[in-house]
Image (cartoon, rainbow, N blue to C red):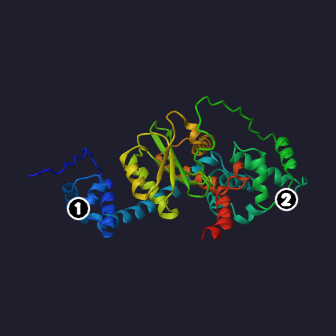
């Protein structure tokens, strides 16, 4: 008999096993803090009967599932490394092309090409080509005093066809070379290297938020920006890439590459980042179905992370991650053809590593995002503590 009590109705909602385990973990935390089952169920937006049914069905699987998942992840990582190494050697032989490398000079150029294009170490490239390392390191006399610098600029332009002489100068200075920027510009033009033309900016006609009220990142991990990007393999299959960028340091926190990325995969990626850096105060994203799903809203509610959704059809309100995606499109996706998903994952991971730790960023005073973050923490972290 219900008497005069108030009947509470809840909208039926289908939960995935990942969401159920995540909510049971949140329930354990609340119960450990002294909460009642009824209050916990109300916080999870489920009924008490559903909570007890979930507990009986999934409660005993937690430890075994986590252990099995770790074992599978370790085995999968080992197999990926083996396959990546084999495919890298096959790509290296394909890059060398037809014909015999009968002279040391041809083998020397082949080793340098493999180091530039595939990022191989000198030891491994020499082993593939059949060149002795002492022969590779031998430098013949040259009458031109700038020959080494010219060759360095040619290698730089081949490795980064969308970079100009300014970034080349910044990289050379960071490596310890004392050289004038105008000299780099002169040699760059004498070698006929491509200088990217300036692109005229398009005028945005959308309604923008006032600068005083716009959310801006003030420190690392203050605002994370999320966005998705798509590409196609040689076989015609669509691959999806999830970008997560720290808006203050411009660091790429993750680039998840898969055939399909749903809300649960997005939350798992955010949990992996938060395990190392902690949770952000805000996440900025568009109104896509994966980013407005219940899984992401629950994650934000459980971690006290606030959301900042941009207006529909207004990508300029999420400029930092859009700029990052544009750089990846211009420098990687538009120039590389992926045969398999594994190849896409390896190349995207390599490009992300180069972006964070090698590529000078013009908005950061030609520092890399990793250098900028390290310098900011060394200057401000003692004050925050």
Between residue 377 and residue 69, name the one nearer to us.
377
Q: Is residue 369 left or right of residue 254?
A: right
Kind of element beneath mark 1: helix
Image coordinates of residue 380 in percent, x first then y, are 66, 65
Image coordinates of residue 122 in percent, x first then y, are 67, 61
Position above or below: 280 against 362? below
Q: From the image, tell me which residue sits under label 1.
A: 55
Q: Please report the residue visible at 85 percent of the width from the left and 59 percent of the height from the top.
A: 178
Kind of element beneath mark 2: loop
Label at residue 5: none
Between residue 330 and residue 301, name the one nearer to us.
301
Q: Please report the residue visible at 47 percent of the width from the left and 43 percent of the height from the top.
A: 240
Image coordinates of residue 31 in percent, x first then y, are 29, 67
Q: Is residue 274 left or right of residue 24?
A: right
Q: From the image, tell me which residue sits under label 2.
A: 178
Q: Please report the residue visible at 74 percent of the width from the left and 53 percent of the height from the top.
A: 365
Q: Is residue 4 left or right of residue 300?
A: left
Q: Are marks 1 and 2 in contact (CB under 8 Å)?
A: no
Q: Earlier in the sequence, mark 1 or mark 2?
A: 1
């Amino acid at each position: 008999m219900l008497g005069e009590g108030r009947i509470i109705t809840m909208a039926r909602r289908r939960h995935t096993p990942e969401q159920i385990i995540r909510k049971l973990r949140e329930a354990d935390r609340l119960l450990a803090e002294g909460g009642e089952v009824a209050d916990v169920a109300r916080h999870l937006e489920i009924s008490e009967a559903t909570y007890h049914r979930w507990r009986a069905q999934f409660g005993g699987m937690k430890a075994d599932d986590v252990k099995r998942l770790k074992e599978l992840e370790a085995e999968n990582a080992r197999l990926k490394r083996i396959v990546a190494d084999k495919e890298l050697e096959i790509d290296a032989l394909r890059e060398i092309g037809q014909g015999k490398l009968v002279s040391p000079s041809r083998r020397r150029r082949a080793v340098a090409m493999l180091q530039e294009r595939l990022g191989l170490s000198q030891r491994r490239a020499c082993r593939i080509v059949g060149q002795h390392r002492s022969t590779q390191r031998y430098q013949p006399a040259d009458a031109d005093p700038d020959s080494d610098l010219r060759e360095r600029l040619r290698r730089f332009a081949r490795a980064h066809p969308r970079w100009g002489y300014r970034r080349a100068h910044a990289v050379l200075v960071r490596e310890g070379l004392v050289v004038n920027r105008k000299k780099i510009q002169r040699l760059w033009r004498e070698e006929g290297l491509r200088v990217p033309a300036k692109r005229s900016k398009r005028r945005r006609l959308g309604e923008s938020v006032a600068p005083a009220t716009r959310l801006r990142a003030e420190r690392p991990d203050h605002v994370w920006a999320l966005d998705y990007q798509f590409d196609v393999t040689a076989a015609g299959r669509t691959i999806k890439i999830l970008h997560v960028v720290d808006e203050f340091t411009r660091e790429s926190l993750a680039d998840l590459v898969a055939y399909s990325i749903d809300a649960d995969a997005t939350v798992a990626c955010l949990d992996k980042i938060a395990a190392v850096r902690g949770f952000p105060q805000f996440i900025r994203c568009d109104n896509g179905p994966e980013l407005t799903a219940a899984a992401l809203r629950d994650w934000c509610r459980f971690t006290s992370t606030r959301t900042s959704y941009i207006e529909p059809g207004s990508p300029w309100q999420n400029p930092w991650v859009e700029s990052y995606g544009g750089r990846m499109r211009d420098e990687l996706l538009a120039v590389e053809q992926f045969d398999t998903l594994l190849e896409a994952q390896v190349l995207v991971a390599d490009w992300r590593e180069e972006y964070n730790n090698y590529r000078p960023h013009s908005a950061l005073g030609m520092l890399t995002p990793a250098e900028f973050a390290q310098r900011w923490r060394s200057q401000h972290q003692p004050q925050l503590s």
